[in-house]
Every structure is written in C-alpha cells, then in structure tokens.
Amino acid sequence: MIELLSPSNGAQVAVTTDLQREFVRRLRAGEMDGNAHEYDWLPKFDRNGVDPSRPAPVTLEWICDGDAEVELFRNGAPAAAEIGPVICRCENGRRVCSSEVSNLMTGTKYEWRVRSENAVSETRELVTDRGVRFVALDGISNVRDIGGYPLPGGKRVKQGMIYRGTCPLGNFEQTALTEKGRSTFTGVLGIKTEIDLRAEVVGTDEARPADPSVEYHVMPIDPYEMALGEKSREKLAEVFHILCDGSKYPVYVHCGAGADRTATVAFIAETLLGMDRDDVKLDYNLTTLSFIAVRSWDENELIPRFFDAAAKETGKTDRQPSIRSLLLSLGVSEAELEQFRSIMIE
C-alpha cells in the first residue's frame, strides 16, 4: 500500500522562491530603480551553489514499503517535468519517501501518483502558483520562459514555447550544460531550435548547438537600437522568420549572457504580443538574479532609444503597432506575424 502525504489534494504550490517573489514585489512597488545599493540584499551568484535565478522545486512525499516512482500528468497525459531521485528516511517507524519535481509550468494544474511493483497510489492534483517561470538547466544560469504573462482579453502568452537564457556551452562565470542539463534541454523542455545571437562565434568552433539533435542558427545581432543598424537588420528579420514557423518550437534564444542581445529579441517579441509594459520591463530586470550585473529597464537609456528609433522609422508612436510595422518593413509578412501570434497566445 502507498499512502500519499503531501502536497494535499488540490494544494497550490510555489515554483518560485521566496527571494524571487520578493524581488518581483520590490520591482512592482518601485523600490528598485537601478541604484546598486538597492540590490545589496540579494545573495551573490556562486556557480558552486548559489543561483538566485533557479526555480523552486516541488517536493512530493509518500509512505511506501518498497521501491516506487512518481508519475506526473497534465490534462491526463504524461507531463514534461524533471522528476528527481527518490529519497527515503525512517520516521516513527515508517518509510517516508520524497522526490523533487522541477521545471513545472506556472499557474498550471497537474495530477500525480506513486507506483510501485505491487501497488498504485491514489491520484492527487496540485496547482502551481502564477508568476514568472524560471527554468533550471544544470550547468548554466539566467534561463526563463517568456510565457505565462497575461495579455488583453483574458489571454496569456503560452508557456513552453520560447526560452531565453545564456549560452548553453558556457560563458563568463558559468559552466556549460552538464549531461543532466542537456537531458533537460532536449527531453523536458523539448527544444527543437536554438538561435545564437553572438557575432563573436561566427567562423569558430564555438558555433555549435547545445545538442546534435537541435536545429541551430547563428543570427548575430547587436543589442537595443543597434539592432536596427544595417548589419543587424537582416538577421533580426531572420530571427522572426524562424519564430513565425510553428514547426521550429520550442525555441531557445541566447547570446553570451542572455542579458542584452537576448533581451532585445525578447522585448520585441513581447511587445508584438501585446504584453503589458510593466511585464516586459520585469522580464528584462530579472536578469539581475543571475551572475550578470544589475539590469534596470528604467536606467538603460538604450531601450527608449530603440523604441524611439522604431517609432521614427515607422511613423507610429504606440509601441505594439510600431514593432509590428518595423518587422513588416524588414520583410516579415502579415501572415507570418499572425502565425506568430497564433503560436504564442492562448
């Protein structure tokens, strides 16, 4: 017999850490505007243990006399998530077992049960909290899903489609994806396409995918308003040709640190989808939780200069119509833009 302990049936569970929620709260409250001292409360990134950008796992607990494994479902089908090893302990004469589940989607209902050789437990439901979907990829930092954010009309940006992050092969203070990280990249996240925005790798042996199974594109662009310069415009259009093709998903977009060039593609895509400006700003600022220095939307003068340049070029002052017109002028078709929206909005 298997007795499930926790979470209780229908419980809401956190997939973000207390620190991440406090960071978001302070940003929303306007308590951090880019002054370095306002971030002194954050722990320093340490690749040997401390990474504030990693999500919180959900711990499942049960009682079972023998070996057993967790089964996780979403909408009745096996769910894509990372289920950790089973750890058992003796507690009041009982064999209590647990397993951590990582990389769950936010605001999502899951069903779980435990199966042994001779028994199957009851099935329980759990619901993850709403918020930013941080992603754990073993070996690298600063990875998150741009999905989950609300859109006008009660819709949302679809999760599990576009991931943004650092170079999977390692960069600066981080290492490269481990074998476990690659398994998560291709298996749990199911990445089909990797877009590498780095110019510095063109013609080098660093221009290679995280895994041979992934379709890999080097699309070097400059960040912010420089992305509208002559040498970046064509590649920016090619990035969006890929993002408008449903067969390419899920997609992983990165530069070196996932901070500036990656952010430029992200905020163009997010604005095109109609995300609230505060949410676009939040996604940008969350890079501060990684090994990168503080990133403050309000303090970066290059960001308004990008939107000003787009407005000047298109003659449209509202950001969403301006970005749409900009991409059309770069050769992305109306049909492609509608396809992008149908792919990314639920």
Image: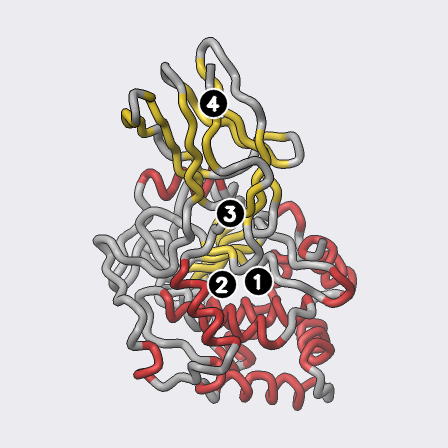
Tell me the residue that label 2 is attached to: 219
Q: Amino acid at mark 3?
A: Val
Give the foreground label among 4 and 2.
4
Q: What is the secondary structure assignment of the residue under circle 3?
A: strand
Judge by depth and name the residue closer to the eye, 283 or 167.
283
Q: Earlier in the sequence, mark 4 or mark 2?
A: 4
Q: What is the secondary structure assignment of the residue under circle 1?
A: helix
Q: Residues within 10 Å of mark 4 (few under 14, many from 20)?
A: some
Judge by depth and name the residue closer to the eye, 325 or 129.
129
Give the foreground label among 4 and 1.
4
Q: What is the secondary structure assignment of the residue under circle 4?
A: strand
> Is residue 217 among the parts visible in the rendering?
no
Residue positioned 72% across, 63% down in the render: 337
Tell me the residue that label 4 is attached to: 3
Residue positioned 68% across, 59% down in the render: 156
Q: Residue furthest left?
A: 48
Q: Position of residue 113 (x, y in %)?
A: 53, 26
Q: Amino acid at mark 1?
A: Val
CA gap between label 4 and label 1 equals: 50 Å
Q: Residue furthest top?
A: 118
Tell me the residue that label 1 is attached to: 239
Q: Is residue 299 left or right of residue 243?
A: left
CB-based contact (under 8 Å), mark 4 and mark 1: no
Q: Amino acid at mark 2?
A: Met
Among the 4 quarters of the image, the one containing residue 178:
top left
CA gap between label 4 and label 2 equals: 52 Å
Residue positioned 64% across, 73% down in the render: 276
Q: Is residue 331 above or below residue 162?
A: below
CA gap between label 1 and label 3 equals: 36 Å
CA gap between label 1 and label 2 equals: 7 Å
Tell me the residue that label 3 is attached to: 13
